[in-house]
Amino acid sequence: MPTPEDWRVAFARQARADLAAREQLLANPAIPACQQFHFLQMACEKICKANLFRQGSAEHDLRQSHAYIAKQLPLIAREQLSVRGKGEPKWFRWAMRRLARQIELLAPAVDDGGRHAANCEYPWVGAGGRVMVPASYDFGVDLQREPAGRMLMKILYAAIAEASG
Amino acid sequence: MMLQTNGTKEATARQLADAHLRVDGGLLRVIRLRAPDEQEARLEEPVKLLEINADTPLNGIVPVYFGADPSHGIAHASVVVEIAPEEFVELEAGRLKLPDGWVIAEEVRRASAAKG
């Protein structure tokens, strides 16, 4: 029977594959941003679940929800910054939490209690009753130019590499 | 807000460096990285930035890829390698290695110039 450690490594390796697919999508500017955001959200979710496996969570307990990123990703970042850095700067902490929540909300199953229907996979009904399409929607997530965006991505890559074995 | 760019990789490098220095408190210097000449000359070759950041964890060389964003004025894809100041010393001494034949090139911006 697989152990939590087996699951941890497996989820991290699949997260690495998600990021590799995202890089391929980023190389083609004709592909709508929602596609790379989908892979980013999936990679983040998997490394967050990998982190929970490290803490002993059971696989069946983590099947149902996609809402792990907002809580777990800042914890992963804090650990990286504590163990491999000089601690977590205050400016980074709030920015990281905000970005992690933005990424979590990209999943269709996470809708903030019905208040946030926008997601990177399926059309939804927007303001004024119009049907919105992910492929033509601006999600407002700018990892290049928002505080902590690039460091978040570096930490994500590093955490996945460490957990992948 | 729509940003303007003249479309060269140099312009993209400056534009990104300025944007990064505006938002990240620990960022000290932004230096261009270049691939071997023939590869660097290709339009699809990303702009590569080495960013020295006092706040970043010591993970070594971790290239992070970003897409072009023409609707927001970013004409080229980019790669950011963020390292701590002590890692930059290691890199200059040859104890840390860049991937794919990349070399350290010109400085694009440093914190005091951009923030002053």
Image (cartoon, rainbow, N blue to C red):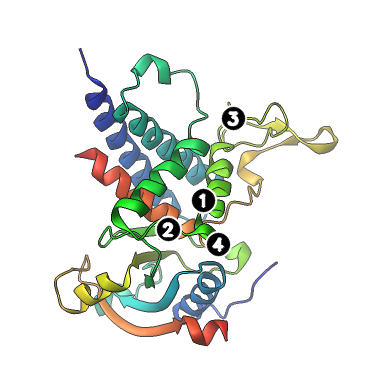
Distance between mark 3 and mark 4 Cα atoms: 24 Å
Quadrant, the C terminus of chain B? bottom right
Q: Secondary structure at mark 2?
A: helix
Residue type pointed to by label 2: Met
Q: A2 or A123, which lies in front?
A: A2
Q: Quadrant of residue A1?
A: top left
Q: Which residue is mark 1?
A: A96
- Which mark, by number, is residue B21? none
Q: Is residue B41 above or below residue B45?
A: below
Distance between mark 3 and mark 1 Cα atoms: 21 Å
Q: Which residue is mark 3?
A: A108
Residue type pointed to by label 3: Pro
Quadrant, the N terminus of chain B? bottom right
Proximity of marks 2 and 1: CB atoms separated by less than 8 Å = yes
Mark 4 neighbour class, 10 Å CA radius: few under 14, some 14 to 19, many 20 or more:
some
Relative image position of residue A28 (x, y in whole percent): 45, 55
Q: Foreground mark, 2 or 3?
A: 2
Distance between mark 4 and mark 2 Cα atoms: 19 Å
Proximity of marks 3 and 1: CB atoms separated by less than 8 Å = no
Q: Foreground mark, 3 or 4?
A: 3
Residue at 50% across / 36% down in the picture? A71
Q: Secondary structure at mark 4?
A: loop
Residue type pointed to by label 1: Met
Q: Which residue is mark 2?
A: A151
Q: Secondary structure at mark 3?
A: loop
Q: Label 2 marks which chain's residue? A: A
Distance between mark 1 and mark 4 Cα atoms: 22 Å
